[in-house]
Image: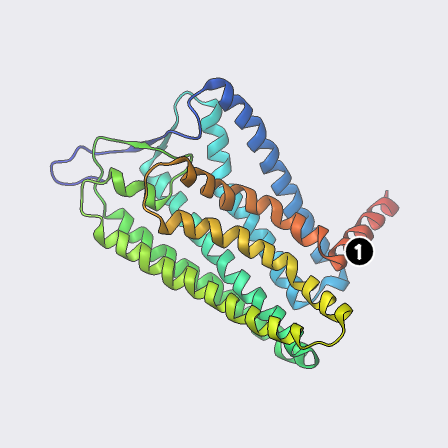
Amino acid sequence: MALGNHSTVTEFILLGLSADPRVQALLFVLFLVIYLLTVMGNLMMLLVIRTDSHLHKPMYFFLSHLSFLDLCYSSVTVPKLLENLVSQKKTISVGCCLAQIFFVFVTGGIEGCLLSVMSYDRYVAICHPLHYGQIMNSQLCNSLLCGSWGLSFLDAFINILQAMSLDFCEDQSIPHYSCELPSLFPLSCSDVSNSFTVLLCSSLVHGLGTCLLIVFSYALIASTILSISSSSDRGKAFSTCSSHLTAILLFYCSGFLRYLMPTSGSPLELIMSVQYSVVTPLVNPLIYSLRNNEVKAAVRRTFRKYLQYR
């Protein structure tokens, strides 16, 4: 990766969350449990939505893809974190580091797009209920999904091409448990201004763009809900959005803080990264199952079918 007079750097050292072996052992157990629960929770959501005909609706079509993304998102970083917690050699090759950065961009970008698409779905369902089926048809749903994937892959390619042009110095230590693009900038011997500008612009366009779509959708939703005369109907309309709003706040608040704040290696950066890459994929299935009556009913039906087959 390095050119000119710089020594070739073939790997980085991930300093992780703690240098204390006893703390590392506790963290290994904690993150292993979290990862297993994340996998089981998101697989359960995929199974229930796929097998229960009552959930064959646009909202749950997007939710199934969100569960798949959460599964992938967590799998990009957590397995390497677990390996480093029990390994003496806490290294990652430059190629694997860049691959991890690429897939973090892809999965995180698609998740942000999906959350904005789901906001639009809730807007149509609440503000135009009589035309919901006509507007949110399968062609539009597939187009929105393909657009989310395409935009996120383009964003990831642009950022990773800039990262591949960086030269790295002798200092190979990354004060993090995974590779994230902001963490590579302090290690570079070359000018990072272009890479930083591309990262900042893509974060603002992609992240802030999808966030503004969400805010706009929910502003229209709030206006419609407040115009409903019946308090019970208002409560019912709001309950259909509460789980989605919770997922949005968890993902966007930590993501924006991590990628838009200056890189300093502070514990806050690690906390923000753990929040959106580890905690969010874990809690999303809980949010959408425990706070959604349709999903809870579908889970009960699925388990009853399973017990009957046994």
Placement of 288 over or under 205, stated as above or below: above
Placement of 193 over or under 310, stated as above or below: below
Residue found 32% across the figure and 56% down from its top: 200
Placement of 100 over or under 239, stated as above or below: above
Percent of width and height locating residue 118: 58, 65
Asked which colour scheme the image uses, the reply is: rainbow
User: Which is more toward the observer, 190 or 149?
Assistant: 190
Q: Is residue 180 left or right of residue 42?
A: left
| Quarter-of-image position of residue 237 | bottom right
Q: Is residue 257 left or right of residue 230?
A: left
Q: Is residue 208 left or right of residue 58?
A: left
User: Which is more toward the observer, 190 or 80?
Assistant: 190
Considering every residue shown, the one lying at the far right of the view is 308
Percent of width and height locating residue 143: 53, 71
Q: Is residue 218 left or right of residue 287?
A: left
User: Which is more toward the observer, 98 or 170?
Assistant: 170
Percent of width and height locating residue 149: 47, 61
How many numbered tags mark residues here?
Answer: 1
| Quarter-of-image position of residue 233 | bottom right
Considering every residue shown, the one lying at the far left of the view is 5
Percent of width and height locating residue 33: 61, 33
Residue found 60% across the figure and 75% down from its top: 223
Name the residue tied to disc 1: 297
Residue found 37% across the figure and 43% down from its top: 180
- Quarter holding the N terminus is top left
Q: Amino acid at mark 1?
A: Ala
Q: Is residue 46 visible?
A: no
Q: Is residue 300 visible?
A: yes
> Label 1 neighbourhood size at 10 Å, few (<14), some (14-19), many (20+)?
few
- Quarter holding the C terminus is top right
Q: Secondary structure at mark 1?
A: helix
